[in-house]
Image (cartoon, rainbow, N blue to C red):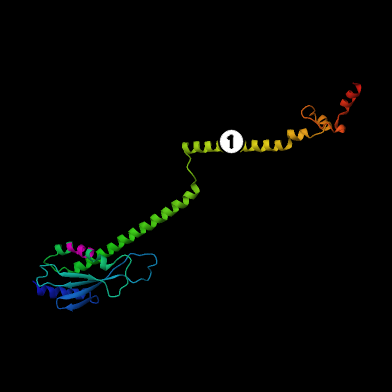
Amino acid sequence: MGRDDQIEEREVLNSIFPDEITDISDTSYRIQITLDAPEQDGDEGAEPPVLFLQVSYPEAYPDVAPDLEITAPPNAPKHPRLDVQEDRARLLEALQPAIEENMGMAMIFTLVSTLKESAEQLMSERQAAAQAQREMEIAKAEEEENRKFQGTIVTRETFLEWRERFRREMEEEEQRRREEKEAEEKKKKPSAREEKKLTGKQLWERGLAGKADYDEDDEEGIPAAMEKMKVSA
């Protein structure tokens, strides 16, 4: 075991990934992994995300774990659901169970499959979380819109409050009408000062004789009946 196993595994991988594998040295190489990203709105025609798994064989591999590194292609656009720089530690950690289970055997093909599955699962989880967030925002917006048409829910307390406010408004309205009516009647009724200025004839004709003095110098204002009473005396 050791170097012979490494050469044999490398030959098998070359047959599986003829276009994806690139040698770096006699004991290290890089495998390109194209991920199947979850569909997103406006994502039609977008390039799928790509990872590189770089493998270096220690002398005792496969009895010890290989040295692994995960990178993204140079100048690759940042994917909204996967950031290799931020997610590298999580992806490498996801490979540890597979490494432990396959210790002593060729494991790189298994690690490539596990890495692809883990990265796609991570993107799917984030896509689902983003979708749930959008649906929650839509539901919240619809709820706010529906409240405009629901009005205020009537309870015993709100009804009593409304009734008290209604009664108070009616009393105030009634008081305002009474004041307006009194003011109008006051305008129509002559004041005591106005009555005092009336002539005796005007007072007599209006039935106000005795309620106010008439002008004693105004002889024409003396009612005819009073003139007769004067002659008889």
- Up-down relation of residue 92 to residue 74 (above or below): above
Residue furthest out toward the front: 217
Quarter the N terminus occupies: bottom left
Three-letter amino acid code of the residue under disc 1: Glu
Question: What secondary structure do most residues of the magenta stretch adopt?
Answer: helix
The residue at the point 66 percent across, 38 percent down is 180
Residue 38 point in image, percent of width and height: 33, 64
On screen, residue 181 versus residue 116, left or right, reads: right
Name the element at disc 1.
helix
The residue at the point 89 percent across, 26 percent down is 227
Residue 16 point in image, percent of width and height: 21, 73
Residue 49 point in image, percent of width and height: 30, 70
Examine the image and state in which quarter residue 120 appears: bottom left
Residue furthest out toward the left: 1
The residue at the point 50 percent across, 37 percent down is 161
Q: Nearer the viewer, residue 192 or 98?
A: 192
On screen, residue 65 versus residue 158, left or right, reads: left
The residue stretch that appears in magenta: 90-96
The residue at the point 43 percent across, 54 percent down is 141
Residue furthest out toward the right: 231
For disc 1, the marked residue is 171
Residue 74 point in image, percent of width and height: 28, 75
On screen, residue 167 versus residue 54, left or right, reads: right
User: Label 1 neighbourhood size at 10 Å, few (<14), some (14-19), many (20+)?
Assistant: few
- Up-down relation of residue 172 to residue 135 (above or below): above
Q: Nearer the viewer, residue 175 or 13?
A: 175
- Indicate yes or no whether the magenta region holds residue 95: yes
